[in-house]
Image (cartoon, rainbow, N blue to C red):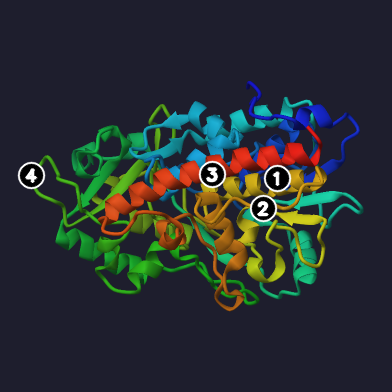
């Protein structure tokens, strides 16, 4: 994989004796941070406990293995994820480069073949001359050296214990759920149709499984009666709003799924010429279209119950499930309480956090947070003052949410337009909703570009260049 060439004066000033940085966790955040710092000629030691110690959700020893969805969200330039991607690309995002090499049809979403994606990330990391990969579990920071923890939702118990002590917290977790994957050859194509919502093109992006009203009611009855995996006695169930298990959504009302992951809006069944009563969308897992993910169907049903309930989806009556849904603990800190604005721990300033540990939610956001942590570490080691992206950018808005929220009401967040404060943008008055978002998108990307150029100029001044 070719190296990114966006660096400037950093290559001139750093020698082979530059400080070592330890990064723990080779997920999206850790891999992104490691590559960013290595490209700026820092010596990086990347620690990954797999395969010596596996997690409940991972199946391989590949870096940046995607264990839930295979989507890195919308590619639409004026969407919130689209803005974030534009800014990440300006920083030379390795994760987005690898995603581009492993794309599968996803409509407006950047969906990837998860195996090809992980292989590409692993290859980029292992082949980099400034990165040393060390296998094995790490349970505490490295003395007198910068340590970046990016161990994600499946942080080991030993490291979790250290984090709890370091942050004086007693419940560093919430629950996250994984959606099932079905074998494409077992799908009844006579009961499904290819389409993207509102005919937005790339109709092969989604395979839609329609329901009649009676079929939907039968499905809901079975879903609500099915046996769930109970939480462990010492854990409290805390679900991130964007990853609610479908049974938790159904418990809020029988029609709630029809306004959530099973909404039929924008879809017409070509067999009937009508909009279905409800729909389950399936998204390709790989380029060969041999497997499909049940979009939005995160679940904590027991395995046997999943097979029975999900085969009540008409097109999946004979489904062979390649992976059933599961549930796992997700570790994160109360970031506004325990982190500095540069994502270092208040009580341990040489220790940084990145990814879902900080309270961001989602693959894209985790990678973005890895870039932010790496950027701030780079500034520190170059004796530059802390310079965060401004709040009228996607990265700046995300950082503001993480570190500037009310600690009493802090919960994980993904990137969305609610994080963009209109007061920080110009000429929005009188515009319609879509026009406002398009204007914010244009301004945010330009604001980030201006900030990046200015921060590089100021960095040169610090070093007399």
Observer-side mark, 3 or 1, equals 3
What residue sits right under mark 4 in the picture? 273
Against 234, residue 176 (above or below) is above
Q: Distance between the residues labelled 3 and 1?
A: 17 Å
Residue 374 disc label: 1
Residue ID at (24%, 50%): 314
**Residue 228: x, y in percent?**
46, 68
Disc 3 secondary structure class: helix
Q: Distance between the residues labelled 2 and 1?
A: 9 Å
The first of marks 4 and 2 along the sequence is 4
Quarter-of-image position of residue 152: bottom right
Q: How far apart are marks 2 and 3 (CA)?
A: 20 Å
The quadrant in which the C terminus is found is: top right
Towards the viewer: 348 or 387: 387
Residue 448 disc label: 3
Towards the viewer: 94 or 196: 94
What residue sits right under mark 2 in the picture? 354
Against 278, residue 75 (above or below) is above
């Amino acid at each position: 994989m070719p190296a990114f060439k966006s660096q400037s004066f950093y290559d001139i000033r750093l020698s082979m004796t530059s400080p070592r940085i330890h990064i723990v966790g080779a997920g999206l955040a850790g891999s992104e941070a490691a590559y960013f710092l290595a490209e700026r000629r820092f010596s990086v030691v990347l620690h990954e406990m797999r395969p010596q110690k596996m997690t409940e959700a991972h199946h391989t020893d590949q870096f940046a293995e995607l264990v839930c969805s295979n989507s890195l969200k919308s590619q639409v330039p004026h969407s919130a994820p689209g803005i974030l991607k534009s800014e990440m690309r300006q920083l030379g995002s390795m994760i987005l480069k690898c995603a581009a090499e492993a794309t599968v049809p996803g409509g407006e979403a950047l969906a990837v073949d998860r195996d090809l994606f992980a292989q590409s990330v692993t290859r980029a990391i292992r082949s980099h001359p400034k990165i040393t990969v060390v296998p094995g579990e790490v349970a505490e920071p490295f003395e007198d050296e910068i340590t970046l923890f990016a161990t994600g939702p499946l942080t080991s118990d030993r490291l979790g214990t250290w984090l709890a002590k370091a942050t004086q917290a007693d419940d560093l977790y919430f629950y996250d759920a994984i959606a099932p994957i079905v074998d494409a050859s077992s799908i009844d194509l006579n009961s499904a149709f290819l389409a993207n919502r509102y005919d937005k093109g790339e109709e092969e992006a989604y395979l839609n499984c329609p329901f009649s009203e009676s079929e939907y009611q039968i499905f809901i009855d079975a879903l609500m009666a099915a046996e769930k995996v109970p939480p462990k006695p010492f854990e409290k169930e805390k679900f991130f709003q964007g990853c609610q298990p479908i049974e938790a959504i159904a418990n809020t009302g029988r029609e709630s799924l029809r306004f959530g992951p099973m909404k039929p809006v924008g879809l017409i069944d070509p067999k009937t010429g009508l909009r279905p009563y409800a729909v389950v969308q399936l998204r390709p897992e790989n380029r060969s279209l041999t497997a499909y993910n049940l979009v939005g169907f995160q679940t904590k049903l027991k395995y046997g119950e999943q097979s029975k309930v999900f085969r009540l989806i008409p097109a999946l009556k004979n489904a062979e499930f390649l992976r059933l849904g599961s549930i796992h603990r997700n570790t994160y800190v109360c970031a506004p309480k325990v982190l500095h604005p540069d994502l270092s721990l208040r009580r341990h300033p040489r220790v940084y956090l990145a990814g879902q540990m900080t309270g961001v939610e989602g693959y894209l956001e985790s990678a973005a947070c890895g870039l932010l942590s790496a950027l701030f570490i780079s500034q520190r080691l170059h004796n530059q003052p802390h310079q965060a992206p401004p709040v009228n950018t996607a990265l700046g808005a995300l950082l503001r949410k993480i570190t500037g929220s009310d600690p009493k009401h802090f919960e994980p967040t993904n990137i969305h337009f609610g994080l963009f404060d209109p007061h920080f943008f110009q000429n929005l008055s009188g515009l319609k909703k879509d026009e406002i978002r398009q204007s914010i998108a244009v301004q945010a990307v330009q604001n980030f570009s201006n900030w990046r150029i200015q921060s590089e100029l100021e960095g040169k001044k610090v070093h007399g260049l």
